Amino acid sequence: MKKFFIQTFGCQMNVYDGQRIANMLESYNLTQTDNVAEADLILLNTCAVRAKATDKVYSALGRIRKVKKESALLGIVGCVARESGSDAFRRIPELNFVLGPQSYHKLPEILENPDTRLFNIDLGGLEKFDSLPAMTKTPNVAYIPVQEGCNHCCTYCIVPYTRGRELSRPFNDIIKDSINAVKTGAIEICFLGQNVNGYNYTDENGKKYRLSDVIKEVAKIQEVSRIRFTSSYPTEMTNDLINMFATEQKLLPFLNMPIQSGSPRILKKMNRPDDLDAYLEIVNKLKQARADIQISSDFIVGFPDETDEDFEQTLDIAKKVKYINSYSFKYSPRPHTAAAIMPNQISEQIKSVRLQRLDFQLTENQRDFNLSCVGKEMRCLFESEDKTGKHLIYRTPYMQQCIVDKTDTISQLLKVKITDANKSCLHGEIIKDK
Ligand code: 5AD
Ligand code: SF4
């Protein structure tokens, strides 16, 4: 039997794409292997969001071409395929296929015609969702896209180029996918979209659906225990969705709503919402809807023209909102983006210092929050065994890792009393199942 190897880089949407690709190849009777040297088909499922992410893909390709079987088919799918286009073949002549994030359903064509090069980086819209076979197994957490692409055009971001304009999937398809996900193993559903809370679908009878409608419907599925969604655009956080945190207990009290910078001047240059008071008002409303809600953010430091004062404002907002589980990045100029050609690009050295200072603050926030959890009871979802084989790793409703002693039978959902915490994880004692 032929074997395939797949390595996924980047965001949750890519993790989802990787799972769909693996499922599709299995339907063609290929089996997955972790050993690239024995694979007959090798795919890198790639991310182009920062230059480093793209570089990683090309260095992995450099390593793989030395160890792969002579006859193995090698290719890239995803955002780097779209970013590089046919130039990818020039850089890595051994490549057999280059498929974009919306054309990877064409992959079986390379199995039929292994002697030709397959190239397709078209933006096929929602076509891929209809062309892929249904998932036959799903991990505890099912990622389900409700929309793909983005219309916001933040000036630093390559995603509108790689994933195209925003398209919302039909409501019924999302419900069908959610039902299939729980039937094949899922306990938690995480709705995905580059602009997930912008979900906006009108059916053939003119009925309009928003993300709150999707959450309400999926919460009715008995086997679904936890629901979350990522990633949210601040000004699309409408009242119907905020109210879901008050009324829908299956919705986890944790929200990823990136601010990127705390400086209105920089936010304007980023083409992001720049009214900090309006942002803080949304945070307030969320806290009113659910007192225990926590918020995470992504940050970019060293955007063109960012001054020390601008950066101090980013530190201020990180402290004020007490973001947890957040990510921070040095600004990276990307092709096809407006910011790449803006004047006053910031030096690597300044970016590094700012990143270090911001990370210090974010770690402080995380430690404070983790310590505040000690003594509390939380319902946690099984993730994996730890390396020693003596402990189990669970995820709290806030996506913290919680470590418990290994038991004979592994319950997927557990009530845990948090006994200890540090900046990176929690420790807990099992109270009882479910
Ligand atoms: N440089 C650095 N970080 C970026 N991000 C997106 N584009 C860039 C870029 N050009 C970050 C943003 C986004 C996250 C997925 O990646 O913070 O929220
Ligand atoms: Fe990376 Fe963005 Fe593409 Fe996700 S959508 S893989 S973060 S470039």
Image (cartoon, rainbow, N blue to C red):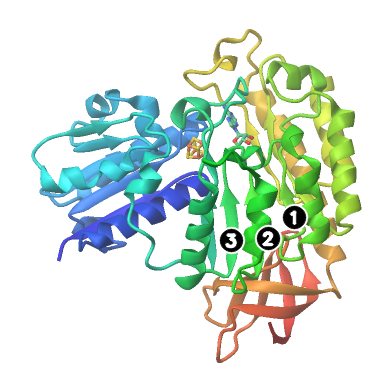
Left or right? Give the position of 192 relative to 41.
right
Question: Residue 306 appears in which quarter of the rendering?
Answer: top right
Q: Residues within 10 Å of mark 2 (few under 14, many from 20)?
A: some
Q: Amino acid at mark 1?
A: Phe
Left or right? Give the position of 87 relative to 102.
left
x%, y% of residue 214? 63, 53
Q: CA distance from mark 1 to mark 2?
A: 8 Å
Residue 2 is labelled as none
- How many discs mark residues in the rendered view? 3
Q: CA distance from mark 1 to mark 3?
A: 14 Å
Residue tagged 2: 399
Q: Select label 2 or label 3 by which is in front.
A: 3
Q: Amino acid at mark 2?
A: Met
Residue 254 is labelled as 1
| Residue 14 in view | yes
Marked residue nearer the N-terminal end (1 or 3): 3
Q: Is the Cβ of the residue at disc 1 closer than 8 Å to that at disc 2?
A: yes
Foreground pick, 55 / 31: 31
Q: Residues within 10 Å of mark 1 (few under 14, many from 20)?
A: many
- Residue at 38% x, 54% y: name it: 20
Question: Residue 56 appears in which quarter of the rendering?
Answer: top left
Marked residue nearer the N-terminal end (1 or 2): 1
- Residue at 82% x, 39% y: name it: 318
Does 104 sit above or below residue 160?
Answer: below
- Residue at 21% x, 57% y: name it: 39
Q: Amino acid at mark 3?
A: Ile
Residue tagged 3: 189
